[in-house]
Image (cartoon, rainbow, N blue to C red):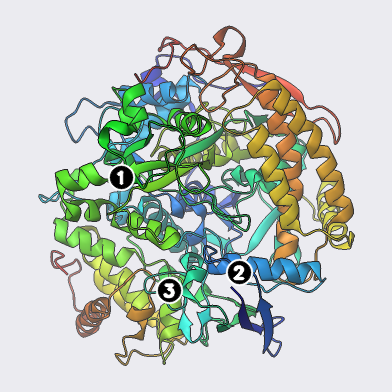
Amino acid sequence: MNVILKVWRQKDAKAKGEFVTYPANGISDEMSFLEMLDVVNEGLIEKGQEPIAFDHDCREGICGTCGFVINGRPHGPRAKTTVCQLHMRSFKDGDTLTIEPWRAEAFPVVKDLVVDRGAFDRIIAAGGFITAPTGGAPDGNTILVPKENSDLAMDAAACIGCGACVAACPNASAMLFVSAKISQLALLPQGQPERWDRVRNMVAQMDAESFGSCTNHGECEAACPKGIRVEFIARMNADFVKASATAGRRAGGGDGGTG
Amino acid sequence: MKLESNVPSGPLEKKWEKHRFEMKLVNPANKRKYSVIMIGSGLAGAGGAASMAELGYQVKCFCYQDSPRRAHSIAAQGGINAAKNYPNDGDSVYRLFYDTIKGGDFRAREANVYRLAEVSNNIIDQCVAQGVPFAREYGGLLDNRSFGGAQVSRTFYARGQTGQQLLLGAYQALERQIGLGRVEMFTRHEMQELIVVDGRARGVVVRDMVTGALETHMADAVCLATGGYGNVFYLATYAKGCNTTAIWRAYKKGAAFANPCFTQIHPTCIPVTGDYQSKLTLMSESLRNDGRIWVPKAKGDKRAPGQIPEAERDYYLERMYPSFGNLAPRDIASRAAKRVCDEGRGVGPTGLGVYLDFQAAIERLGKKKIEEKYGNLFEMYERITDENPYRVPMRIYPATHYTMGGLWVDYNLMSTIPGLFVLGEANFSDHGANRLGASALMQGLADGYFIIPYTISNYLAREKFAPVAADHPEVRAAEAAVADRTKRLLSIGGKRTVTSFHRELGKIMWEHCGMARDKKGLEHGMGKIPGLREEFWKNLTVPGSGAELNQSLEHAGRVADFLELGELMCLDALERDESCGCHFRTEHQMSDGEAKRNDQDYCHVAAWEYTGDGKKPNRNVEPLTYENLELAVRSYK
C-alpha cells in the first residue's frame, strides 16, 4: 500500500517546527508503524537527508519510549496499542497520516517527534516509591496482600510512563500517570506508612511541572495503551483531600490499606 | 594475563558468609568521600546505583534512554526464580544451585552460582517491600509457577510483566536517591570510552545524545551494567538501542571478554515475516507451562492446524524429553524446533515455525483462567500476527534473546581492570553455556542489590585514590579518541546506511554463529566480517552533525563495535571445539543429536585479551573445578 505522511519536523527545542510531506510507498500490511517509518528514513538517508527522529526502544509495547500522535490520536487508532505495536493493516491504501509529537508545555520537543518527559521522573522522585533501603526486608510471605488488592494494584502498576495520557488531555494533565502510581502503592500494605505524604508530594511536583488540571474528559483512559482507568484518579483525589485535611495533625502511619 | 577468580576457600555453603566477614568495610562517615560511576539503569544498574547511594557513596548513573525506567530489563515477561520453597515441593538453595549449574551445562563457577541461589530469597523479600505487585493466592500469600529446566515451581511473577515491575521497583528506589541528591542521573547519555589511569578504571567519556557534547566524568570506581550484546544478530528480542559499546570499549582497554560465543536462542518467539522486520518479539517461556508444542508428523503438511488430527501431530518435546516435556531448557527446545523445521515439518508461510497450542489447557482450565495467566501475551501475539491464539495455535520460532558471555569478572564482579566492575548480563558469570528461564532477573538484582554494595566497599577500602587532573594524558587521550571516531563516522560520505550494514552482519552471524555451528561455517563467517567492516568504514553514510540529536550517528557507533565483536564471537566458537549448552558444534553430538561436551579439554572459561586492532587476541583460560557437583551428562529425558 501507499500512504502519505505529514510529519512534524523541528530541528531542536528552539527551532520553529513545520509539517513536511513524505510519500511512503510499497508498504506491507505486516509492518509495524515504526517499521514503516524505518523504510521512509532509509530512503531519506540514502538521499543524504536527515531521517525523522522518533523515540523507540523495545518495540514490544512495554518500555514506554515510543509515542506520537497520528491523525490527532496518541499512539494512533487502535485501542490499547503503542505505536510500535500498531501495524499498517490498521490503515488503508491512499491514507494521509498526520504525525506530530506529544503537545504539552511540560513535555518540550527535543527534535521532530522526540519530547522530553523528564517531568515524569521528577514526579516519581518526589514520592512515587516506598522507602525500603536494600537489606532489611522481612520474608515476603509475612506481608499478606488480598488477591483483589494485589490485582488492582497490578492494573495500576501496568502504566508504562509513555505520556499518551498527557498528550490526549485537553488540559495536558498528568493525573492518570500520577494517580496510577499513587493507587498502586496505596492499595498495598507496604505503601501505608508514606501514603499521605506521598500523595501530597507527588501532586505538588505535578503542579510544579506545569501539567494542567483534570476536568474529567476521560480522554486519557481512551488513549492509554495499557488500559489504565480513570477510577485511579478518583482514588488519588480522595487520598489527596484526606491528606490535605489531616496534614500535620496525624500520628503517622496508614489506615490498614484497603485503599 | 592472570585470571584470579578470588573464590573464597571453605565449604560452598559458607563461602559468601566468610567472604563478607573478611572484606574490608568503609566507615559510614567516610563513604561520602568515595565516588562511583554506574553505566546502565536496568535491574543491575538501577539496583546497584540505588543500593550504593543508600550506603552513602556518591553515585553518578548514566543511561542512553530518556528515563532510567526504560532499560531493557523492563521487557522480561515470565518471572524471577527464588529458592523459597513456598509450594512445599522440595526446593532448596542447593537445588536451585544444582539446576542452574546443570542448566548451564557445567560451564559456570560453582561458588558464584551458589551465592546467586543463596541471595535469591532476599531479592523476593526486597521487591515485596518495595511494593512490587507479585501475583498472590486468595489467602494473600505469594503465588509461584514453573519454568524450564526445573521440576519445582519456584518462579515468582507479576502477570506477564515481571521484568517491568521489578525494574520499576529498582527505578523507584533510584529516583528516591536522585530526589535526595545522592545519585546524579544522566539520561540520554551514552558511554563512549573508559578512562584507565595507572592501571585502574577511573572514569568515562560519555556523549550527551541531545547536544552531542562529549563529557568526561571521573570517579574512584566504574561499574558497567549495560546488558547483553545480542543485537549483533540484528534481529533479536533486544530493544533496538541495546549495544556492546561500553563493554567493547572496556575490552579494548584491557578487560578480558569471556565466552563471547555463548548466546541464548530463545525457543518461543514470533517468526520472521519480511525483510523490513526490525526486531523479533518474545512470547514468554511461561506459556510452555500450559502450551503444547507440536508440528505435523508428515513433511510439507499444509493443512490448517485444526484440520490435523491428534494422531498426525508430533508433540516432539513431550516425545523426546518425557520427564521435562514442553519445559525442556531453552537451548534444547530451540534446537529441537530447528531440527523439525530442517526436516521440512515446519509450519506457517516460511516453514520456519512450530505450533504452541493452548487448546488442551483451555479445555482443562477454561478460557478465563488462561486469560488471567497469559492475557497480555495473547493480546500482544494477536496485535502482531492478527491471529487469535485462543482459537488457533500460536506459531513460534527461536530467536536471539540473551548473551551468557560478557566481560570476565572475579567473585567480586571485578573485571581484569582493577576498579572496573561488571554487573548483570554484561558480565559472563553464573549462567554457563545456557541460562535457565527466570534467572536473568535474579542475577541482575543479585548483582545490583546484594553483591556490588559489599564488594565495591572492599575495593574502595583497600585502595588509595588521588584526584585525576582533567588534563591527565590518559583523560586527554580518551577524549581525543572519541572525538576522532565521531568525526570519522560523520565524514565517510559513502552510500550505504548503517542499518544495511547491521542487517548484513546479522545475517552472517545467524547463519554461521547461530543455533548450530561448525568449523567450516565459522571460518567462512570470520572471513566475511573483515570485508564488511572495511566497507563500513569506506562506504557508510551518516547524515547530520555531531552537535545535535543524531540517531544515525548513535547507531553507527554501535554497529562499528558489533562489526568487531562478531568476529571475536566466531573465533571463540571456532576454538571451543566441543558442544555445550547453547554452543552446538555439529561435529560434536551424541547419536541422538544431543550436545556432546568435552570436559577433558574445555571445562574452562575462555577469556579473550585484546592485543591490538587486526591482531589475534589471546585466549586465556580459567579452569572450572567442580568440588561439589559431579560433571554429568545433562539429561532432561
Specify whether B269 is left or right of B574.
left
The disc labelled 3 sits on which kind of residue? Ile
Q: From the image, tell me which residue sits under label 1.
A: B307
The answer for how far apart the CA atoms under marks 3 and 1 are is 55 Å
Q: Are marks 3 and 1 in contact (CB under 8 Å)?
A: no
Q: Residue at x 21, y 42 (%)?
A: B360
Characterize the local packing of mark 3: few (<14), some (14-19) or many (20 or more) Cα atoms within 10 angstroms.
Answer: many
As measured in the structure, the alpha-carbon distance from the residue carrying label 2 to the one carrying label 3 is 40 Å
Same-chain status of marks 2 and 1: no
Marks 2/3 same chain? yes
Question: For mark 2, what is the residue?
Answer: A27
**What is the residue that sits farthest to the top in this orientation?**
B600
The amino acid sitting under disc 1 is: Gln
Of all chains, the one bearing label 2 is A
From where the camera sits, is residue A250 visible?
A: yes
Q: Inspect the image, locate mark 2, and give the three-letter code of the amino acid beneath it.
A: Ile
Residue that mark 3 sits on: A123
* Badge 2 or badge 3: first in the primary sequence: 2
Residue at 42% across / 32% down in the picture? B436
The N terminus of chain B sits in image quarter: top right
Choose top left, top right, bottom left or bottom right for residue A183.
bottom left
Q: Are marks 2 and 1 in contact (CB under 8 Å)?
A: no
* Circle 1 residues within 10 Å: few <14, some 14–19, many ≥20: few
Q: Given this view, does label 2 or label 1 mark the residue nearer the observer?
A: 1
Q: Position of residue A143 (x, y in %)?
A: 18, 50
Label 1: state its secondary structure. Answer: helix
